[in-house]
Amino acid sequence: MKFVTTKRQAALEVGKNIGIGILALVLAGALNFYMGRKIMQISRSLSQNRKMVAALLARGETSQATQANLDLVGDNDQKIQNAFVPADNISDYLAFLNNTSRQNAVQQALHFSEPLLAYTQGDLKVDDVKYATILTNGRIGQLVNYLKALEKAPYVQKVDSLKINGTADGGWNSAGTSATFNSDLYVRE
């Protein structure tokens, strides 16, 4: 340790030590200010990165869910599209009805009305074609089988009403049992 001999030297030594202390405080303050700003920038960057990671994970989950839904749908969307008979060509549907009649050994008469617009969404326009069916010369089992085939058909249709008439001598199980029903066939324009 150095000994101070004069007041002047002592004052210089104290001033020098105070100057060094002030310089150290200024440098520490500047370093603290600089490091504080850097820490804030890093904190913001980490926060943004966390948000981006969360968004990417959410997108990944959404993507996986979408893919799972697409796998679930498979080719069913095409089956649904094909279930709507084209309005300008219902010959496949008529062939189906005729084959069903023939397979169940009943005679049928069909009466169709003009199509009426039933539903519109974007490019999809669906018309409702109302029609009446009269089945004759059948037994109740044949008529039920006809209706079951109609129910399983890959077409968008519904039966609105059904009336079954038996004969006076044999009831519903005689060969003369008949059925009349009103239906709707939904077709796409």
Image (cartoon, rainbow, N blue to C red):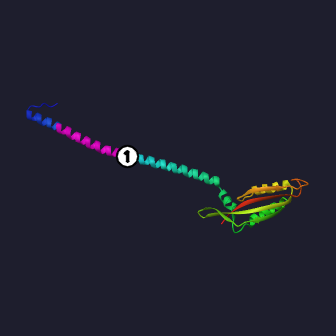
Magenta region: which residues? 18-41
Report whether 7 appears left or right of 46: left
Asked if the stretch drawn in magenta spans residue 179, the answer is no
Instruction: Report x, y in % for residue 187.
Output: 68, 63
Report whether 93 appears left or right of 44: right
Provide the major secondary structure of the magenta segment.
helix
Instruction: Report x, y in % for residue 6.
Output: 8, 32
Name the residue type under label 1. Answer: Ile
Q: Is mark 1 on a helix, strand or loop?
A: helix
Determine the residue positioned at 61% across, 54% down: 70
Determine the residue positioned at 8% across, 35% down: 8
Instruction: Report x, y in % for residue 12.
Output: 12, 37
On-image quarter of the C terminus = bottom right
Quadrant of residue 137 within the rendered picture: bottom right
Report whether 104 appears left or right of 8: right
Along the viewing direction, whichever of 20 and 6 lies nearer the viewer: 20
Extreme residue in the front direction: 168
Instruction: Report x, y in % for residue 67.
Output: 59, 53
Extreme residue in the bottom direction: 88
The residue carrying mark 1 is 42
Quadrant of residue 106 within the rendered picture: bottom right
Determine the residue positioned at 47% across, 48% down: 53
On-image quarter of the N terminus = top left
